[in-house]
Every structure is written in C-alpha cells, then in structure tokens.
Image (tube, rainbow, N blue to C red):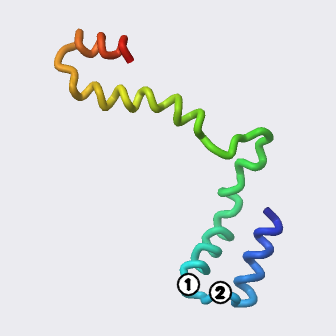
Amino acid sequence: MDVLKAWCENIIQNKEVETNSILSTEIMYLLTHLDGLTSFLSIEGTELDNNQLERKHRLSVLNRKNWLFYKTELGALIGDIIC
C-alpha cells in the first residue's frame, strides 16, 4: 500500500494527470481516504469480500419480500416453515 500511495502522490505532484480530470479526482479521493479504505488490512485473517455475511442475510431478505403476500398469520407460519 505504501508503493501505491507513493505512486499516487508522485502522479499528482508531477502533474502527470490533468487536475480537473476524473482520474485526478479519484486519485485525490484515494489519498484522502487511504487510512479508512485500508484499515481492514490491520486485522490479520480478514476476508477481502463479504460473501459469507451476504449469504446469511439473503434468506431474511427473501422472506421479507414473501411476507408481503401472506394474507393470514397461519399462512405466514406455514410459509416460514417451508422456507
């Protein structure tokens, strides 16, 4: 990450990118928020994705959409048992 930070700072300082370009804006955003964007790297064994968390929440989201169509409590109970 130090190499990336140095490279970004070098590009901005040497004006290799137009100051009003989208790339320059994104590089400045990266430099400004680098600590927050890379804070997960300080925790050993941290996953780079959140697929496990999304899989856990998927069922509740699907059920929430289905709950809109239950007409009775008994129907909702049976639907929950099936799901």
Give the labeled residue for mark 2. 17
Image x and y of residue 23, in percent: 59, 78
Residue at the (63%, 44%) spot, across then down: 49
In the image, taking residue 57 as reference, residue 51 lies left or right, namely right
Q: Is residue 4 left or right of residue 56?
A: right
Q: Amino acid at mark 1?
A: Ser
Look at the numbered disc 2 and give the secondary structure of its residue: loop
Residue 75, label in figure: none
Q: Position of residue 81 (x, y in %)?
A: 36, 11
Quarter of the image for the C terminus: give it. Answer: top left
For marks 1 and 2, give the CA distance: 7 Å
Residue with the most extreme left position: 71
Note whether 44 is above or below 14 in the view shown: above
Q: Residue 12 in the image: x percent, y percent?
A: 70, 83
Question: Quick check: 50 above or below 26?
Answer: above
| Figure disc tally | 2
Question: Which of 45 and 33 lies nearest the eye of the viewer?
Answer: 45
* Figure quadrant of the N terminus: bottom right
Query: Residue 20 falls in which quadrant of the image?
Result: bottom right
Residue at image point 66% right, 57% down: 37
Q: Are marks 1 and 2 in contact (CB under 8 Å)?
A: yes
The crowd level at tag 2 (other Cα within 10 Å; few <14, some 14-19, many 20+) is: some
- Residue 78 percent coordinates (x, y): 29, 10
Instruction: Give above or below for 1 relative to 71.
Output: below
Q: Secondary structure at mark 1?
A: loop
Residue sitting at x 69%, y 63%: 34
Residue at point 77% right, 68% down?
4
Q: Residues within 10 Å of mark 1 (few under 14, many from 20)?
A: few
Residue 53 falls left or right of residue 17: left
Mark identifier at residue 21: 1
